[in-house]
Image (spheres, helix red, strand yellow):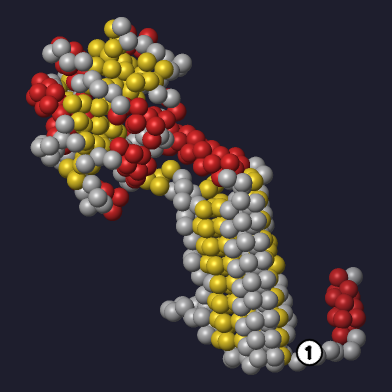
Amino acid sequence: MKAVIILSAGHGKRMKSPLAKVLHKVAGKPMLQWVMDAVKVLKADQLIVVTSPDLKNHEVLKGADVVVQEIPLGTGDALRLAVEKLNSAIDKVFLLCADTPLLKFQDLKNVEFSKVDLTVVGMRINDLSKSYGRIECRDNYPIAIRETKHNDTAKNISIANAGVYAFKADMLKVLLPDLKITPESGEVYATDLVELAIAKKYTTELVLADEENFLGVNTFIELAQAETIQQRRIKAQHMLNGVQFILPETTYVNHDAEIGAGTIIEQGVHIGENVHIATDVKILGSSYLSNCTIESGVNIGPFAHLRGNVVIEENASIGNFVEVKGSNIGKNAKAKHLSYIGDATVEQGVNIGAGTITCNYNGFEKFKTYIGKNVMVGANSTLVAPISIGDGAYVAAGSVITEDVAPNNLAISRTQQQEKNAWASAFRAKYCKKLS
């Protein structure tokens, strides 16, 4: 039987953030969740997460056995606490860190296949100035892990520690009591287990992996690097599935986005959480989408903003500087310019004129607007909810509509236009005389 232990109790002091390091998001998903999802490939019988006291009840830990490290005394101490919670039938233990959100499934499968007592994942690095611990090998077998901050000669080793291990459980229980506090840091390091294993004649193996997959995130600089890499991966997969990004490096796509083939996404687009986009959709530049469903043939943007449980049905069009919030826009409906549609149902074939606003909030409550099939709403209209406009009705441009409109009627609500003969000429003459 297999167990996975994920270490996530570090405070992330270098980030200088009130949010725990492992909860910072990459592509919309907390780093810890990326690691928890990656280890599913191992089909472990037990998942243990070692965390700090303030995270012990966090929703991201759902499904894991949680171990609290009350005082941060290092990875070795955290591992000891986790092993105390191991099921008795566990014979193999995988150890990972929660701050490696780029971890790939295949890297873990390669470790799983190892048959030795202790497997260590390493990565060849070209930049020897990096602060990773180094794996010292003899005849290609790991014999120790050296921390560069405590060992200057370790900086000359080009194989860095990726922070992933597989242990035989019996060996781990034998070695853990022998871990000592490192004087320089006052902490107990799990990395010392390699040297202890060699001293007691246990077998070791090195598994090499891509450095990119094990980028450790300790600062916001590294978090930005991880975001860039994950965005590249996400968009590459969408492109292989038939989605066209005009300038992919300028767009953001959340990890859970669903995008259909034939869709074109222009520069500067933000696709946030819970977005479902069907086939043959066009999303023009600088549009922002979150919590919305876009059906086939829809045009969005540029500079459109969709949020809060929005549905845009087939062949509808949401144009430039239009915000849609919590609304359903029907088939072939159009809102092309400078409008706000909030908490509304807009049926098929409706045309929303430029500058239209649904007034859905009175300062205390939200109210609904219903616009029936094939309604024409004139430009610069204000629809004060709660309100219903019947099928086929017309709303005259510039109207403020406060009452329901019956089907096929014309609703007009604006003051009577007045003209004063020659008023403008007299007004100008008066001011020209003053200025002369």
**Which residue: 39% across, 13% down?**
158
Q: On the rendered structure, is 221 left or right of 74?
A: right
Q: Quadrant of the C terminus?
A: bottom right
For the N terminus, the image quarter is: top left
Above or below residue 293? Residue 32 is above
Q: Residue at x 58, y 87 (%)?
A: 388
The front one of 82 and 279 is: 279
Q: Position of residue 393 (x, y in %)?
A: 69, 87
Q: Which residue is mark 1?
A: 417
Give SS at disc 1.
Answer: loop
Asked if residue 170 can be seen in this view, the reply is yes
Q: Residue lying furthest top in this view?
A: 139
Give the residue type at disc 1. Gln
**In front of the other: 162 or 228:** 162
Q: Is residue 123 left or right of residue 75?
A: right
Disc 1 crowd rating (10 Å Cα; few below 14, some 14-19, many 20+) is few
Classify 334 as above or below 153. Answer: below
Within the image, what quadrant is residue 427 found in?
bottom right
Q: Is residue 171 left or right of residue 391?
A: left
- Splitting the image into 4 quarters, where does residue 296 fall? bottom right
* Residue occupying image coordinates x 52% and y 62%: 292
Q: x and y percent of residue 8 in the render?
A: 26, 39
Residue 374 at x, y = what percent? 68, 81
The tally of labels here is 1
Query: Residue 71: in sight, yes or no?
Result: no
Instruction: Give percent across and percent down for residue 11.
Output: 27, 38
Q: Residue drawn 28% across and 17% down?
A: 205
Give the image quarter of residue 41: top left
Between 237 and 20, the one lying in front of the other is 237
Q: Looking at the image, which is closer to me, 329 or 24? A: 329
